[in-house]
Image: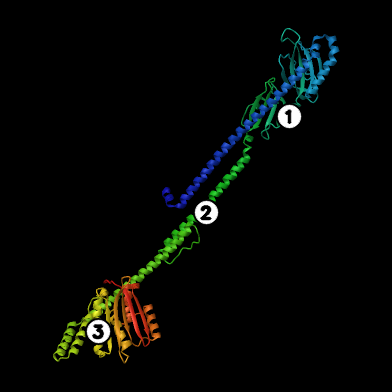
């Protein structure tokens, strides 16, 4: 049901697509956040490990430095000679030994005291603080080794010892130890080793001995580290770097909540970027709705209304594709209205033509009342005229009979030849009536005689020319009727007289009447014009040229084919 609604709604599809984009953005944000946090955590731990390794490197350098100083002290010729003397002889060398000790202190300022012990760990020479007074334990060491933390003086300042074995270099027995040199050291230089090693604000960095007593610390507390603080947990991540110097260690404790703290800036950037992405998607959704979906719905509502309000037009000012569609829709409606009007006009014309046809048929039916009686009467008059040798009356009666037969004939479409023959019969009547004063000349080309044309297209014009143009002339006149073919498959009919002509005002009024299509009863020029327009439409042309005292010329142009409607 829902999928069907989605398929039927473009806005629902757009909304579903937008939700898909938003879900993808949320999923991308979550994955990016997890990846960024994991990456930054790994980077922080890797950096911390490198920092601890650097501390170890500095401690090894310090170890080598102290080893060189201890070697300088212990294996100097004076000290070696000092070990070989008895108590009395050592008194003579004591000043020289003290000078060597002072030089050693000058080389390393952290040295608080130097003591020489024999193989029985009995002190034989010394300077400065002593390990025994600091509470340290004296043990014979076979290798150089850093001792545990002890406290010196009233301040209980932490210090440590460095054990350096003394071997007899003058004896043939290799590796015979003859004593021990002990350096009592302060921890101040170690503080410099630990500087700039905090990767977070609250990272704790410790330098501890083998008993986990703190020599120096950054961010932590002095004293002894409990074993629980040396194991990673929920609150701290612990990393231990062994130094190999009397089991000394460098220990870092990083708060777990600060491991990803460096991602805060990146997280803010990511959140900001995804927030703007959400805003852009929402803006895109609203833009698509107002500029596409809403306008399409507006066009749909407009199309529905046009069935009830056909004169309604779309008000759309956009220049984009939908604006072009709206403009095309308005043009289509205008074209449809124009076509509907043309159809109505055509139907009106067809109705008027049908009405005209019915009127002609009614008139024909009326004229057919007792036609045989009239024909027999005309034949009787003609026979009597012939009996009494009055040929003119016989011929006039025959012409009138033929004209009457043509008028009541039911056919609406006839040949040009039939129309010409009717004019000839009518011309006979005119010549007898006006005693030959008015002549009718006929000029018809052979190419048009068999062409078909509507009935009574010429005879009313000849009648108008006789009774309105020539009858008032004393000297009489002439009517010339011509028919011929012209270009474009059309025929030209001309009725020209040399009568009185038409006054300009009357001519203008007649043309206006014809152009406005004002109906006129009777068989005159207005009747002919209306029948031409009804039958031929715009293909028919009728022109009137007249000059007062010079005559009138009426020209008709129609297609050379006509079919019954």
The residue that appears at 35% across and 84% down in the rendered structure is 552
Which quarter of the image is occupied by the C terminus?
Answer: bottom left
Q: Nearer the viewer, mark 1 or mark 3?
A: 3
The residue that appears at 75% across and 25% down in the rendered structure is 187
Whether residue 221 appears in this view of the structure is: no
The residue nearer to you, when weighing 408 against 28, is 408
Q: Quadrant of residue 215?
A: top right
Residue 192 is tagged as 1
Percent across and percent down for residue 294 are 48, 56
Cα distance in 3D space between marks 1 and 3: 143 Å
* Lower sequence index among marks 2 and 1: 1
The furthest residue to the top: 172
Q: Which residue is mark 3?
A: 426
Disc 3 to disc 2: CB gap under 8 Å: no
* Lower sequence index among marks 1 and 3: 1
Say if 479 sits above or below 486 in the image. below
Q: Which residue is mark 2?
A: 287
**458 left or right of 183 in image:** left
Label 2 Cα neighbours within 10 Å, binned few <14 / some 14-19 / many ≥20: few
Cα distance in 3D space between marks 3 and 2: 83 Å
């Amino acid at each position: 049901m829902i999928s069907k609604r989605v398929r039927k709604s473009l806005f629902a599809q757009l909304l579903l697509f937008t939700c898909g984009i938003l879900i993808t953005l949320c999923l991308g944000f979550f994955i990016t956040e997890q990846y960024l946090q994991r990456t930054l955590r790994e980077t922080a731990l890797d950096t911390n490990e490198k920092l601890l390794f650097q501390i170890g490197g500095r401690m090894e350098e310090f170890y080598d430095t102290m080893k060189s100083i201890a070697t300088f002290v212990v294996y100097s010729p004076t000290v070696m000679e000092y070990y070989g003397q008895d108590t009395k002889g050592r008194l003579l060398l004591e000043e020289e030994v003290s000078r060597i000790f002072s030089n050693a202190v000058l080389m390393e300022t952290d040295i608080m005291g130097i003591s020489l012990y024999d193989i029985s760990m009995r002190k034989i020479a010394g300077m400065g603080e002593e390990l025994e007074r600091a509470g340290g334990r004296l043990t014979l060491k076979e290798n150089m080794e850093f001792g545990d933390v002890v406290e010196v003086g009233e301040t209980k300042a932490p210090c440590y010892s460095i054990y350096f074995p003394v071997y007899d270099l003058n004896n043939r027995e290799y590796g015979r130890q003859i004593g021990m040199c002990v350096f009592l050291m302060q921890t101040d230089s170690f503080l410099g080793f630990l500087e700039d090693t905090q990767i977070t604000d609250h990272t704790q960095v410790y330098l501890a001995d083998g008993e986990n007593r703190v020599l120096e610390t950054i961010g932590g507390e002095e004293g002894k580290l409990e074993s629980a603080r040396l194991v990673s947990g929920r609150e701290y991540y612990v990393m231990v770097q062994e130094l190999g110097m009397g089991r000394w260690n460098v220990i870092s404790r990083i708060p777990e909540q600060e491991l990803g703290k460096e991602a805060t800036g990146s997280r803010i950037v990511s959140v900001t970027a995804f927030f703007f992405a959400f805003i852009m998607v929402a803006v895109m959704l609203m833009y698509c709705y107002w500029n596409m979906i809403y306008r399409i719905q507006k066009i749909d509502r407009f199309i529905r209304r046009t069935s009830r309000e056909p004169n309604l037009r779309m008000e759309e000012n956009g220049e984009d594709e939908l604006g072009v569609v709206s403009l095309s829709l308005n043009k289509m409606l205008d074209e449809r209205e124009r076509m509907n009007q043309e159809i109505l006009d055509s139907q009106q014309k067809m109705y008027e033509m049908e009405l005209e046809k019915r009127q002609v048929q009614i008139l024909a039916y009326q004229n057919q009342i007792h036609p045989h009686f009239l024909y027999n009467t005309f034949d009787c008059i003609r026979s009597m005229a012939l009996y009494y040798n009055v040929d003119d009356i016989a011929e006039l009666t025959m012409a009138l009979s033929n004209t009457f037969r043509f008028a009541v004939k039911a056919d609406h479409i006839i040949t040009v030849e039939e129309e010409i023959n009717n004019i000839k019969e009518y011309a006979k009547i005119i010549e007898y009536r006006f005693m030959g004063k008015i002549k009718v000349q006929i000029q018809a080309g052979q190419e048009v005689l068999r062409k078909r044309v509507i009935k009574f297209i010429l005879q009313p014009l000849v009648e108008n020319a006789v009774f309105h143009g020539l009858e008032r002339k004393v000297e009489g006149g002439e009517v010339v009727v011509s028919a011929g073919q012209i270009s474009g498959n059309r025929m030209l009919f001309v009725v020209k007289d040399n009568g009185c002509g038409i006054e300009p005002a009357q001519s203008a009024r007649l043309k206006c009447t014809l152009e406005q299509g004002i109906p006129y009863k009777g068989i005159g020029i207005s009747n002919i014009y209306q029948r031409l327009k009804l039958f031929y439409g715009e293909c028919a042309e009728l022109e009137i040229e007249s000059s007062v005292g010079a005559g009138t010329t009426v020209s008709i142009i129609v297609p050379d084919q006509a079919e019954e409607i």
